[in-house]
Image (cartoon, rainbow, N blue to C red):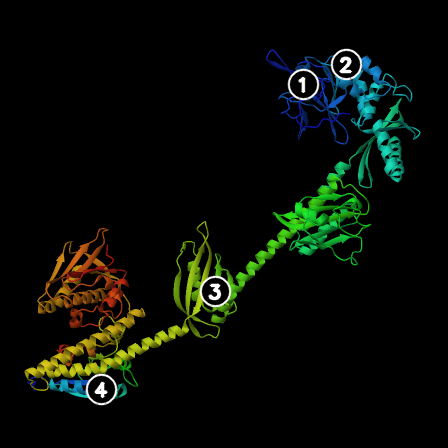
Amino acid sequence: MHMLNAKNMNRCANCLSENIVSSVNKDRIFYVCKNCGMKNAEILDSTRPLFTLRKDGLVCHKTVAALVNMDGKYLFLNRRQFPFGFALPTGHVNDNETPDKAIERELYEETGLKLKNKKLILNETVYDRCKNGGDIHEWFLYEYKCKSSAFIYNEESSQAILVPKEKLEELDIVTSTKYVLSRIGLLSKVNPPLRPLKKDNFLSRKNGYEKIIIESLPVAILVYGKSDAINYINKAAKELLNNFKKEKPDNYKKFMAMIRQISIKCQKSESDLSSNINLDKDTYNVVANPIFTDGKIAGSSLVINNVSDIAQQEAINVLSYQTSLAVSSPASINQIVKTLLKQLFLSLDIVGCSLMTLDNGRLKIAYRYSNVDHTKRKPLTFKIGEGVAGWVAEHKLPLAIPDTSNEPLYVGPSNKKEKSILSVPVISNDINFGVLNLSRKQDHYFSEQEIKMAQIVANRIGLALENNRLYDEIKFEKEQLNNIIENTGEGIAVIDSKGKPVVWNNAAKNITGFETAEAYAAANPSFRDRLKSMLTPANKSNRLIYKKVQVKNYDNQTQWLGVTYSFIINENHKLDYIIIMLRDISKETEIESQQREFIYTATHELRTPITAIKGYLSMILNGDAGGINKVQRLYFDRAARSTDKLVSLVEDLLKVARLEENRVVFESKPFSAAKLIGEICSDFKQKAADKKIKLCENFDEVKDIRFIGDYEKTKQALANIVDNAIKYTKKGEVKLKMESLEDGGRVISVSDTGVGIPKKDQNTVFNKFIRIPNPESIKAGGTGLGLFIVKNLIEKQGGSVKLESILNKGTKISLHLPEAK
Amino acid sequence: MPETTKTVSKRILIVEDDEMLLEMYKEKLKLEGFRVSTVSDGKKALARIKLGADLILLDILMPGLNGFEVLKRLKQNPETSKIPVIVLTNIGGESTDKDKKLALSLGATDYMVKSLNTPSQVVEKINSILK
């Protein structure tokens, strides 16, 4: 039989031969088929597939007919030429068309013929040639040049027979078709009743047609007569049984017994049967149909198909499914691999299987499943490239050795247990894990199916090993991270978006004394409330928030903690986690408060003797101790002024201490800028006049401007600045102004014509105790705290201070405050 | 020494624990024509006030009973509550300090920081209150 493969080759459309030559004649190319002599032979379009397997069935190229046999093999034949083809409804069924109409149409389109009474004519010559046997198909291929053919369409089985129209023996096609079809099991029912046949010899000349068909079908067909004797056995059946006899005589006997049983059963029940026979690893499907003569049971026809392929595919599917389950089970890696090897072992006829893993370039047996005791043997190791396993590991391809005694690659003891071996690589994610080996006791050519199954298991093993490796990696990293978090000195707590604590590290436990975050929150409700407010969806802050809080620790003692909150926002701008770092600042807070206490007591202590000195000096100068002379007055005056400086220093120290601890309360009320500037100017009028410096106030805007803040403190700040301005100006003026900025803000500015501040010092001038060395500053005196206090006072109200200065020309300080609307 | 002719000189009670300062204020007030009595702690102050006074100069930081306590009690006692009290201390600040606020809320008539005021300024304040 010719089997057409589906590869695209140029074939003669008439006889399907590949033997085509091209010839040029008058600038035209035409083809001649060397086989059938067809000139201008049509070439089957090599780019179009001869057939396509679709969900709804097989679709063939229109010039090709398909023969389908019971075990799913297809035989493709030139439709035109070939008389005996069972074609599935091929081609295209249009809308509003039934399949039989489609076939009629196709036929007409192709051949220009219409079915006439569904009658067929058989070529007599051909028939004669074939009546003594011989493969009619071959004859037809080479000799028959039919150009037109007709369909016999069988509705029940949806099958059609294509036969050449001309010169065919007339047959009562309808009846005989069904008859034939029923013989080969394609009809489950025989309907209507068949024509009576000649006794026991239904394969008469008249019915030679059927014989030809049956003889040549690749399905094995046996016919049993009433007496359990085999009346007929076709060629395929003979072959099948001969194979049995040769290879497995035991199986032959078994098989024959089984099919006889089926036949008996069929005849007894007078109904159709279908059953599967399993022998070794092959599966045969047997369909039995009863044969009636004169309405009485006369025998049974059996159609036998090797469905091992189907069964094999089933086996592969089952293995695939089972191994899938094994890989995804929660068992340990050892158990999974062992299970996979066991599944493989049970699926195939092997003596054992083993997994060799790669370790430092060497293959070692890691797992084994077999029914042979290996404990006494020394485990073999192979380098990559060494031995069969080494070869497979190196080339990453499977290798099957049917006979190890004849194989130079095979390295190992001449082993009765390992006569044939199959080795497949175990690879996952491009990582070469090793090699899976299977072995059999006999010489054996490993089938495609066996190799496929071994590869499935190898893949699964690779997957399991890779999963395990990844899992270990992740676990390790997670442990490392956990270690770091647990052992860091800072207390760390992490709260998820629902408020549930997910981390509460060792340091947090130690610092607070509480084992869990929940216990800590329970003892400190303010912490819980603060967290709640931070978990609101409105908080999309990326900033760090630092707070000093006073909490209760486990021993119910108050403790000062420095708490830093940071927020993890995900890509949807939703809060994922809050990270809280805790630090015990009780000691620092204690020290700070001690320092503050010190400053308060110190200033208080300082104030007392200062009060006395100041007081007595003032009384002397007031004349309360009697008259004093000019010189005495001068000296006492100087002493009094020094005392005043002392007082300033102490006051400044106190202010600084208070500002630093944020103990000062700033009011936030609207006040008039005009009032502020006016008061300052009047306060400093005398001082300025004393130095003969002009003090002027200037408004270039409306006088009804109001700022929001603390009036007293702003006044203090402004006073400091004006005081400095006057101090550092030898001559000229000190101007107070209200100015507008480009961005619409407003500032109070104090400009002087004094010594100015060098550029390098302009940044540090607002720091504590900074006095720029120049002759004026020495004369001017001061504590160096003035500008620091100014900056503090203004910034704490939400304002800002700006300084501009040119050496020897003057300085301008601008105070920006929030304006009242 | 200036003499007061028509007015009876007022009695001032100075409550101050620092000897030096106590002497200084005593001197000054006497110079200005006031009758002065002095005590150096809170307990003694509450006892002495029974003898009456026109004004009290009250220090805060004292051993034993501190000035705020004394002030509280003075104001709670109907016999002494009407006597004006100037808190004269070296703690706290001047403008809107909380010590000043506390003193005033407890009933003090005024609050002065010693180191920031000369004795003459104290006398001025006393005179303005007693007018």
Q: Chain of mark 4?
A: B
- The residue lying at 77 percent from left, 16 percent from top is A143
Q: Chain of mark 1?
A: A
Q: Extreme right residue here? A: A227
Whether the residues at callouts 4 and 3 have beta carbons within 8 Å, the answer is: no
- Can residue A637 be seen in this snapshot? yes
Q: Nearer the viewer, mark 4 or mark 2?
A: 2
Which residue is labeled 3 in the image? A492
Which residue is labeled 1 in the image? A21
Q: Residues within 10 Å of mark 2 (few under 14, many from 20)?
A: some
User: In this orientation, which residue lies closer to the viewer: B94 or A610?
Assistant: A610
Q: Secondary structure at mark 3?
A: strand
Which residue is labeled 2 in the image? A119
Q: Quadrant of the N terminus of chain A?
A: top right
How far across and down, in percent of the image, does residue A819 sit?
A: 23, 56
How far across and down, in percent of the image, does residue A516 sit?
A: 52, 67
The amino acid beneath tag 3 is: Ile
Residue A301 as seen in the image, left or right of residue A683 = right
Whether the residues at callouts 4 and 1 have beta carbons within 8 Å, the answer is: no
Q: Is residue B72 above or below residue A573?
A: below
Q: Is residue A97 above or below residue A276?
A: above
Give me the C-alpha separation between circle 4 and circle 3: 61 Å
Give me the C-alpha separation between circle 2 and circle 3: 94 Å
Tags 4 and 1 both on a single chain: no
Which residue is labeled 4 in the image? B49
Q: Is residue A423 above or below residue B6?
A: above
Tags 3 and 1 both on a single chain: yes
User: In this orientation, which residue lies closer to the viewer: A433 or A782?
Assistant: A433
Tags 4 and 2 both on a single chain: no
Q: Nearer the viewer, mark 1 or mark 2?
A: 1
Q: Chain of mark 3?
A: A
